Image (tube, rainbow, N blue to C red):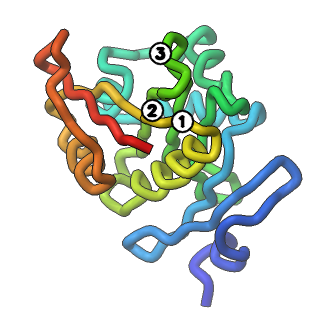
Amino acid sequence: MPNSALDTLPHPPFPDQQGQYWIDALTDGSHVLIRPLRPQDRGREKAFIENLSPLTRHQRFLGEVKEVGEQLLNQLMDVGTPQRVAYVALVHDNGELREVGISRYAQVDDQPEQCEFAVTIADEWQGKGLESLLMQHLIDEARLHGYQQMYSVDAASNYNMRRLAKQLGMRSVIDPDDATQVIHSLAL
């Protein structure tokens, strides 16, 4: 018996009207829909960030973000090109799709062979393998577009990111400009 409507869909990857999507199983047996972030996800993206715990929000933005203003939201929604990609993880919640995770990269302006990435998981969905799934789709996309390296700058205290970086085979070094930060990088 399927656990949700997502369980009845075919598994990775399948094109929809606007691109590809995947139905991926998490370590707890639940399933998520992963697909590119779309303009109509704007409200979901705002609600997702606003519902993160203060710690998770701080780790994502390396600072305090109390309110998601239009400027930040415009920047986060500026995706859909090979230079700026975002994959969103969605679940059914009372008949509505709810965002529970996102991974993204953006090309580095002065080094077009590199892209900076970020991955954020809703607090109640952490520890279920979602971050690895989102990152694998993002890594595959970066390789497809010819990037040679991905990197992320994170708080040294971000245990979840350190664990994910190790799991994905990334190289991690203390930021030479700020000892409270770590740079995780992956050669593609």
Q: Quadrant of residue 52?
A: top left
* CA–CA distance in space, label 3 to label 2: 22 Å
Nearer to me, 160 or 174: 174
Q: Residue at x 33, y 53 (%)?
A: 168
Q: Quadrant of residue 142?
A: top right
The kind of residue on which mark 3 rests is Glu
Disc 1 secondary structure class: loop
Circle 2 residue: 117
Q: Residue at x 48, y 54 (%)?
A: 136
Q: Earlier in the sequence, mark 3 or mark 1?
A: 3
Q: Is residue 145 above or below residue 9?
A: above
Residue 67 is labelled as 3
- Looking at the rendered image, the disc whose residue lies closer to the viewer, 2 or 1, is 1
Q: Residue at x 29, y 45 (%)?
A: 170
Q: In the visual, does 173 lie left or right of 26?
A: left
* CA–CA distance in space, label 2 to label 1: 12 Å
Q: Earlier in the sequence, mark 3 or mark 2?
A: 3
- Looking at the rendered image, the disc whose residue lies closer to the viewer, 3 or 2, is 2
The kind of residue on which mark 1 rests is Tyr
Q: Position of residue 12 (x, y in %)?
A: 65, 69
